[in-house]
Amino acid sequence: MNIRLYDTATREVRDLDPVNPGEVSIYLCGATVQSAPHVGHLRPAVAFDVLRRWLTRQGLKVTFIRNVTDIDDKILAKAAAAGVEWWAHAARYERVFTRAYDALGVLPPTYEPRATGHVPEMIALMRDLIDAGHAYATTEGNVWFDVRSWPAYGELTRQKLEDLGIEDDGVLPSEAGAVAAQKRDPHDFALWKAPRPGEPATASWDTPWGRGRPGWHLECSAMARRYLGTEFDIHGGGLDLRFPHHENEQAQSRAAGDAFARSWMHVAWVTQQGTKMSKSLGNGLLVSELLEHAPAPVVRYALVSVQYRSMLEWAPDTLDEARTTWDRLTGFVSRAGETVGDVPADEIAKADVPEDFAAAMDDDLNTPAALAVVHEHLRAGNSALASGDDDAARAELVAVRAMLDVLGLDPADPQWTAPTGDRHAAALDALVTVELEARVAARAAKDWATADAIRDRLTAAGIEVQDSADGARWALAGS
């Protein structure tokens, strides 16, 4: 096996050396389901989907875990503002994320655990840390990780403790003083958090140290241990998660005696005019907006076309360029299929990909180089069709489809061959419906600013909202 991947921890490209030969275990930090996903949320999901497909193609058994953070300060705040139960708010947006994953052809994970379903595992991990002298409880419901008890703290991002920023643990400014007084060191981070005044009782759980809810970092360490064991191959996520989230995960897991992740992979941001895409900056392109403007495989192609560790600058012509290329690919597959006949899916799945393509994928998932090989064979296939060489055309059709299958972009895959209009309309309807439900909740809570913001966002995406006595309806502008 020649697969080499960049390890964020060692800052070098290393051979993939699985814990168990022939198997690869992966944990990907998934969504915090507070609101609808933008394209930046989908980039890590698509990148790791490509990794998983390539590993599987190489004959490896992949166990792929992608968690759902369904309890969080922002979830509680947004649910309260909308006047709905926090768990209902989380479930609503979990469905939106799932639909977005499905729309872009991201394979379902082996398991998709929710944070709220793994409190016993979190309690066990806290007990291990307290017993080992790496964590301590203070006031009722508050448990902290003692960073100075773990000399290796900061090793993932190669930072000294005194140079690190201080995590706010999601506290309000009015709480900052009281929280700081509980910590042995300002850098200590929350493993468990006591309920705040006014928070619903359903958002906390009993522990030996008092009632509360999990800190952000504890949940992933507990779920990784539960599904992948004390040592696994790859931990991944977006580049912005390196600190504090992944640094804290690694520290608490290793302090508890787990070897944890052998290597780390981080996916670079999607940017606009050089600025990271995010909801807080107001520059996030919702997946629902993109699917209104372009077919899902075009969006996926745009995400795959840039190597996962490089920033992806999302420009006005990004989708236009991807659409042009996708049309060339689908055109060849369609013409070749009509000429030489359909190629069975199992033949595509078993076909050897060209050596240059395999070399590019083995080289830290170098998808731009891999796509260059695809286009070489696309040109050869078109030439074979033009010259009437059916045998060569069929060989190139198999090669092109096999390579695109690794990237999740085979035009003949049922994912993309279902009636396009119906499939995309259904995906768009599902995403817009959730936005309208959030708007109804905001109006019920007299949160007019949020309600207006949702309507403005939909309008900007070309969607007209029509209010009536029977509720809100939507239509594409001009339809």
Image: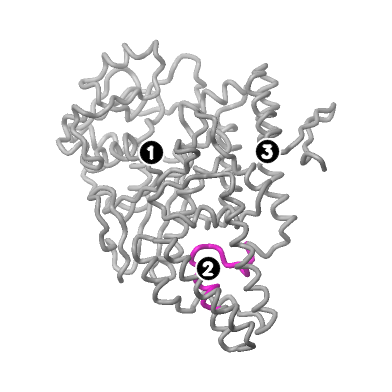
- Please provide the residue range marked out in magenta: 398-415
From the top left corner, tell me how far across and down residue 14 is, in percent: 25, 60
Q: For residue 24, which quarter of the picture?
A: bottom left
Q: Is residue 195 magenta?
A: no
Would residue 147 appear left or right of 24 to someone viewing this image? left
Q: Earlier in the sequence, mark 3 or mark 1?
A: 1
Q: For residue 91, which quarter of the picture?
A: top right
From the top left corner, tell me how far across and down residue 365 is, in percent: 39, 61
Q: What is the spatial separation of the Cα atoms under label 3 and label 1, in whole angstroms?
A: 27 Å
Report which residue position mark 3 lands on: 461
From the top left corner, tell me how far across and down residue 141 is, in percent: 35, 22
Image position of 368 with respect to 377: above or below: above
Image position of 409 with respect to 152: above or below: below
Would residue 340 appear left or right of 142 to someone viewing this image? right
- The circle drawn on residue 405 is 2
Given this view, does label 3 or label 1 mark the residue nearer the observer?
Answer: 3
Q: For residue 92, which quarter of the picture?
A: top right
From the top left corner, tell me how far across and down residue 170 is, in percent: 40, 23
Report which residue position mark 1 lands on: 240
**What residue type is disc 2 on?**
Asp
Q: Is residue 405 magenta?
A: yes
Q: What is the spatial separation of the Cα atoms under label 3 and label 2, in whole angstroms?
A: 31 Å
Image position of 109 with respect to 256: above or below: below
Rendered-image quadrant of the N terminus? bottom left
Q: Is residue 454 visible?
A: yes
